[in-house]
Image (spheres, rainbow, N blue to C red):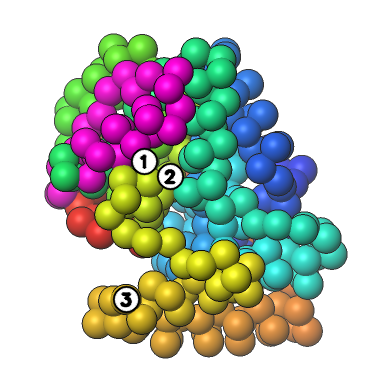
């Protein structure tokens, strides 16, 4: 699995791409046209910190082809640490819509993997209503547990047989990244981990107001709605992220965790998990 390094910059050792919506969409469709595997994840503070706390996961993230700056604090870190001058983040739910719009134009069917039937049914309905030419070639609920190598091949076969040209994965961080990392080379198409986009576009969860998103306060909107589940993530991880970014800015540079820390071929020979009930 070859990872282009030209746009990647270290944010606490995780290689976030200094990129734009247009660039990512173009790379996704280049891969879709040529039936080439491409791993993409929209990465916010939570995703970065999962890598900080788990060296194996950091190496897995750095094996991705594209990690977009999903959260404003990640975009700000790229600009502050590396002078990238990015004017906007590349937010997973918006990236999904832009890819769906382009897929409708070019006649590329899509596949939806993750969450539950109660989410997938309205998600498919809403996407097809919004983009009348879009074809959802197939969908599959999360299996909510460990996926054996045989089950991985079964899922990959279902995706390939559907005729989809790209797949969106909504399992929540970090499980969706583990899933995409494990499946990328088995399906030979772009796979995009987009987290809460499934619930948002299914109409089952409200997005933060635009002003909160621009101000980097989307986390607060989600925290207020579900403090019991999210307090550890935001009360503990957000300050730790800020402190570490300041340390990177004024201390020693933090190199990217090497993908080869995982050893051997990137496709795993062991079970992978997809047991996230609530995207994050």
The residue that label 2 is drawn on is: 193
Instruction: Rate crowding at label 2 as few (under 14), some (14 to 19) or many (20 or more) other CA atoms within 10 Å.
Output: many
Q: Answer with mark 1 or mark 2, whichever residue precedes in sequence.
A: 1
Q: Quadrant of residue 1?
A: top right
Q: Answer with mark 3 or mark 1, whichever residue precedes in sequence.
A: 1
- Whether 276 is drawn above or below 105: the answer is below
Q: Nearer the viewer, residue 32 or 15?
A: 32
Residue at image coords 68%, 63% = 75
- Whether 262 is drawn above or below 190: the answer is below
Left or right of 219? Residue 249 is: right
Q: Nearer the viewer, residue 270 or 32?
A: 32
State the extent of the magenta-drawn residues as a range: 119-147
| Residue 79 forms part of the magenta stretch | no
Residue at image coords 20%, 56% = 277
Instruction: Rate crowding at label 1 as few (under 14), some (14 to 19) or many (20 or more) other CA atoms within 10 Å.
Output: many
The residue that label 1 is drawn on is: 169
Measuring from the top left, give residue 65's x and y in whole percent: 58, 39
Measuring from the top left, give residue 19's x and y in whole percent: 71, 47
Can you tell which mark lies on residue 225? 3
Q: Is residue 212 visible?
A: yes
């Amino acid at each position: 699995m070859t990872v282009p390094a030209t746009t990647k910059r270290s944010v606490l050792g995780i290689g976030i791409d200094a990129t734009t919506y247009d660039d990512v969409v173009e790379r996704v469709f280049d891969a879709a046209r040529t039936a080439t595997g491409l791993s993409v994840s929209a990465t916010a503070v939570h995703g970065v910190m999962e890598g900080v706390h788990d060296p194996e996961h950091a190496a897995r993230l750095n094996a991705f082809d594209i990690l977009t700056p999903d959260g404003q604090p990640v975009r700000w870190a790229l600009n502050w640490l590396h002078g990238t001058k990015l004017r906007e983040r590349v937010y997973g739910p918006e990236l999904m819509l832009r890819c769906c719009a382009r897929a409708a134009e070019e006649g590329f069917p899509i596949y939806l993997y993750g969450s539950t039937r109660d989410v997938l049914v309205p998600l498919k309905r809403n996407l097809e209503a919004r983009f009348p030419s879009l074809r959802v070639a197939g969908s599959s609920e999360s299996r909510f547990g460990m996926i054996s190598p045989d089950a991985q091949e079964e899922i990959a076969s279902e995706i390939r047989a559907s005729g989809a040209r790209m797949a969106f994965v909504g399992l929540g961080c970090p499980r969706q990244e583990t899933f995409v990392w494990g499946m990328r080379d088995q399906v030979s198409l772009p796979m995009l981990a987009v987290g809460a986009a499934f619930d948002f576009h299914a109409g089952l969860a409200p997005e933060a107001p635009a002003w909160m998103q621009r101000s980097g306060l989307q986390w607060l909107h989600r925290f207020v709605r579900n403090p019991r589940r999210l307090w550890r993530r935001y009360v503990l991880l957000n300050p730790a992220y800020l402190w570490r970014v300041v340390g990177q800015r004024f201390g020693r540079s933090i190199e990217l965790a090497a993908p080869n820390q995982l050893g051997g071929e990137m496709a795993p020979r062991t079970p992978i998990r997809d047991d996230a009930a609530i995207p994050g």
